[in-house]
Image (tube, rainbow, N blue to C red):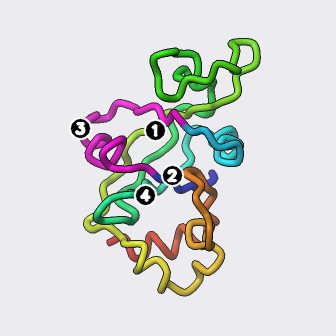
Amino acid sequence: MAKWLVKSEPSECGIEDFIQSAGKSIPWDGVRNYQARNFLTQMNEGDDVFLYHSSCAQIGIAGIVTVVNGAYPDPTQFQPDSPYFDPKSTLEKPRWQAVDLTLVRKLPRLIPLKALKTLPGLEELALLRKGSRLSVMPVSEEEWQIIQSHAG
């Protein structure tokens, strides 16, 4: 099973949304970056995912979710009233993908970005690379274990 990290603003889809969904899946849609989309297409049922809160007061890893449905065409690309509508996407040739995620657990405490930057072994973590702004990225097994050991 692969490991991943997804970034979201908690006001849009954060750990509390997963807690409130009570075992139901949440579509991870609206990704409009080709590299992030390509990572979404690689996600499979059972893959573990760190949920990272960004663009907020407390930036960091807030919880763990899992993929319950692998990549499928993102329905928001076809909805004219959606902010994620893409008029160039067609049912025959969709441009964007989504996956369904469900809560595994909320971390006892958020792991702040500042703390992640100090952990040995995370030097190559995509999240910490200068200029990295992807909302979906792979995490190696070693990086996963390092972060897990600080998750509590």
Q: Position of residue 81 (x, y in %)?
A: 45, 17
What segment carries the magenta color?
A: 8-30
Amino acid under disc 2: Val
Amino acid under disc 1: Leu
Amino acid under disc 3: Gln
Q: Nearer the viewer, mark 2 or mark 3?
A: 2
Position of 71 relative to 118 (above/below):
above
Tell me how far mark 2 sits from mark 1, CA to CA.
11 Å
First in sequence, mark 4 or 3: give its number: 3
| Residue 128, quarter of picture | bottom right
Residue 20's label in the rendered image is: 3
Q: Nearer the viewer, residue 15 or 30?
A: 30
- Tell me, yes or no, whether the two marked residues, 3 and 1, touch with CB atoms within 8 Å: no
Where is the C terminus found, in terms of image quarters? bottom left
Q: Which residue is mark 4?
A: 52
- Tell me, yes or no, whether the two marked residues, 2 and 1, touch with CB atoms within 8 Å: yes
- Tell me, yes or no, whether the two marked residues, 4 and 2, touch with CB atoms within 8 Å: yes
> Relative to residue 89, is residue 107 drawn left or right?
left
Tell me how far mark 3 sits from mark 1, CA to CA.
13 Å
